[in-house]
Image (cartoon, coloured by chain):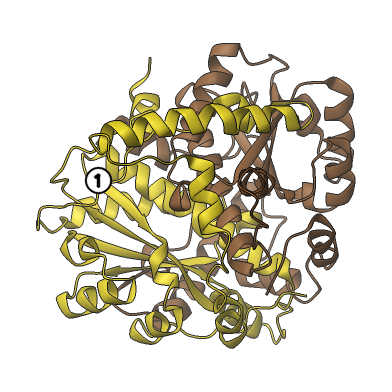
Chain colours: A brown, B yellow
Amino acid sequence: MNPTIDLLQGHRSIRKFKPTPLSDEQKQAIIQSAQMASSSSNIQAYSVIGVTDPELKKELARLAGNQSYVEECGLFLVWCADLYRLQQACAKHGVDMQHQYVESFLVSTVDVSLAAQNAAVAAEALGLGIVYIGGIRQNPAAVTELLKLPKLVYPVFGMCVGVPDQEPFHRPRLSTPSVYHENTYQPSQIAQGIEDYDQTMRDYYHERSGGKMDTTWSKQISEKYAHPSRAHMRAFLDDQGFGFE
Amino acid sequence: MNPTIDLLQGHRSIRKFKPTPLSDEQKQAIIQSAQMASSSSNIQAYSVIGVTDPELKKELARLAGNQSYVEECGLFLVWCADLYRLQQACAKHGVDMQHQYVESFLVSTVDVSLAAQNAAVAAEALGLGIVYIGGIRQNPAAVTELLKLPKLVYPVFGMCVGVPDQEPFHRPRLSTPSVYHENTYQPSQIAQGIEDYDQTMRDYYHERSGGKMDTTWSKQISEKYAHPSRAHMRAFLDDQGFGFE
C-alpha cells in the first residue's frame, strides 16, 4: 500500500546480528530521526547513549541478564529519561526545578519512548534490525554507574541495532478489536480478544516448537504477574532523584 | 536518502485540520501499524479509543484545555496504558495479578508510547497530520469517566489525526551532541547544548513572531518548572489502581 506502512507492519525483533559496526551516516540518520519525534511541550526530556566500546557492551550484556546480542550488535543504544537537562536549564535562571511529581517521570518516559520508536523505524528503513532490551532494568543502578548517568537521568530500555543475521517469524498480535475501541472502552472486546489470542498463540508456539510447546498468552501473562515485577525499581528511581508525588 | 527517513525527519505537529473524517482503510492502516510496535515481553499493555462522536470530541476538546483541534480533526485517538487486559488474563488462570510496582506503570506507559509513535508515522505516511495532546491529563478523571475506562487503564495522551489545513514551521531541536553521547554520559555536552539551543530558539521565536517574542528555551523551561506539574496525577493514578511500589 505504502512503503512506510509496509515497513511498520513488517517489524520483527532481531536477536542475532552480524558484527558489522554502523557507519557514521547510519548513526546520524537514526539519531536525527529520533530527535524529530514529538516531545511534550518541547521539553525533549531524554538522552541516548550509543555504546560501541567492546568492554562496556560486554558488561551491559551481562547486566541485562546475559543477553549476548547486546554484545554482538553493531550499536547498543541506551535510552534514558532525562530531567537533568531541564534542571540545568532552570538553574541558568535561578529556578529550583519542581520535578517531584509523577507527571515529570511520566513525560520523560513518554518522550524517550517516542524518540526511540522513531529510531527503531529509521534503523529498519536502512535495512538494519533492532530489539528493545528491557533487561537493563534488571540492574539499573549498575547500568547507571557504568554509563556515568547523573542524577535525574534513568535508563528506560536498551536497543540493539545492527545487521540482521536471522529471519525470525513475525509474532502475531492481539486482534485489532481487542486494542482498538470506538468512542468508549468495550470490556467485552477485551474478554473476546484474550480468548482469540490464546488460540492464535497456542498454534504459533506449537508450530514454532515442532509441537513441544503447549501454552497460551494468558497463561504466560498469569505466570509472569503471579510474582513481583522488578520490585527494586522504585528505590533505584528514588535514588536517581525521580519523584512520585 | 530514504523516503521513510525523510518522512520521520520532516515531522511537524499539525494544529489545524480539514473536517474530513478518516476512511476505514486509513484507520486500519494506522492502528495495525501501531500494533506491530515492539512490546515489553509481548504484554501489549495498551488500548486506544478512536473518538469520532461529535459530542465526545467537543467535551474532550474542553477537558484538554479548550484545544479546538481536538474537536476539528478527523479522528481523535486517546492512547491508554492498559493493565486491565493483563489482570483479566491472570484471572482466567486464578492468579491475583501483582501490579502494584512502578515497573508495571512504566512498561504500560512505554508500550502505549511505542504503539502511538508508530501510529503517528503511519498517519504521516498516508499524508495526514498529527499532534499529541498531553492536555487530556489536565482532567484525567473526567476523561476516564467519559470514555468509560475501567480501573487499571489510564489515558496517557491524546492524538489528533486528520487532513492538514496548515503548513507550520519545522521547530528546531536540540543539537545532536546534546542528546546523543558516545559510551558514557557527557555533562559538558548538556551545558553546551543548552547554550546553543537558546540561541537557535531565540532566533526562531523572533522570526516567527515578527520580532515581538524574545525568549529562549531554557527561559521557557524555567518558567514551566518553577511550578508544580499536574500535581493531581498521583491521586488519579492511585484511584485507577496503578501502583508505585
Q: Residue at x 74, y 51 (%)?
A: A152
| Residue B160 appearing in the image | yes
The amino acid marked with disc number 1 is Gly
**Measured from the top left, where is residue B51 in percent x and y?**
26, 70
**Measured from the top left, where is residue A45 in percent x and y?**
58, 47
Q: Is B209 situated left or right of A205 in this image?
A: left
Q: Residue at x 74, y 49 (%)?
A: A154
Q: Is A6 situated left or right of A100 in this image?
A: left
Which quarter of the figure has residue A99?
Answer: bottom right
Q: Nearer the viewer, residue B175 or A11?
A: B175
Q: Chain of mark 1?
A: B
Which quarter of the figure has residue A228?
Answer: bottom right
**Measured from the top left, where is residue A150 in percent x and y?**
80, 43
Q: Nearer the viewer, residue A134 or A178?
A: A134
Q: Is residue A33 above or below residue A134?
A: above
Question: Quick one: which residue is furthest to the left in this view?
Answer: B19
| Residue B43 appearing in the image | no
Q: Nearer the viewer, residue A87 or A104?
A: A87
- The C terminus of chain A lies in quadrant: bottom right
**Measured from the top left, where is residue A95 in percent x and y?**
64, 54
Q: Residue at x 78, y 67 (%)?
A: A229
Residue, disc 1: B129
Label 1 sits on a secondary structure element that is strand
- The N terminus of chain A lies in quadrant: top left
Q: Nearer the viewer, residue B223 or A116?
A: B223
**How dense is the environment of label 1, judged by Cα within 10 Å: few (below 14), some, or many (20 and up)?**
many
Q: Is residue A221 above or below residue B194?
A: below
Query: How many numbered marks have been drawn onto this rendered protein structure?
Result: 1
